[in-house]
Image (cartoon, grey):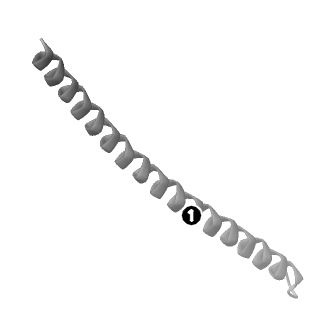
Amino acid sequence: MKKEKSQSEIALNRTITELRTKYSEREKLLDEEQTENNKLNEKIEKLEEKVKDLERNKQNLPGS
């Protein structure tokens, strides 16, 4: 009986370890995706600001 309990504990611990590894990897991927998303959002904001500046400059040109 003790041996059966030990084997079931080993199996449970193995499952727990596998799940921790699996979710740790997913968490890392999610963090990387969020970081990339933040970088892209920053680029979008900068480009939008450049567009606004260009539109303002265009309005200030003679003949516009």
Residue 27 place in picture, x, y as percent: 43, 47
Look at the image and tell me in which quarter the N terminus lies: top left
Tell me which residue sits at (10%, 19%) in the image.
Answer: 3
Labels in figure, total: 1
Location of the C terminus by quadrant is bottom right
Residue beneath the point at 61% across and 69% down: 43
Residue found at the far front of this picture: 2
Say what secondary structure mark 1 lies in.
Answer: helix
Foreground residue among 40 and 31: 31
Position above or below: 19 against 29: above
Asked where in the image residue 21 lies, by quadrant, the reply is: top left
**Residue visible at 62% across and 61% down in the picture:** 41
Mark 1 residue crowding within 10 angstroms, few (<14) / some (14–19) / many (20+): few
Residue in front for this viewpoint, 23 or 9: 9
Give coordinates of residue 15: x percent, y percent: 24, 31
Q: Is residue 11 left or right of residue 40?
A: left
Q: In this view, does 31 lie to the left or right of 4?
A: right
> Residue 29: x percent and y percent?
40, 52
Residue 13 on image: x %, y %: 25, 31
For image coordinates 22% across by 34% down, the residue present is 14
Residue 54's place in the image compared with 11, above or below, is: below
The kind of residue tagged 1 is Leu
- On the picture, is 53 further left or further right than 10? right
Mark 1 sits on what residue?
A: 40
Identity of the residue furthest to the bottom in this view: 62
Q: In which quarter of the image is residue 38?
A: bottom right
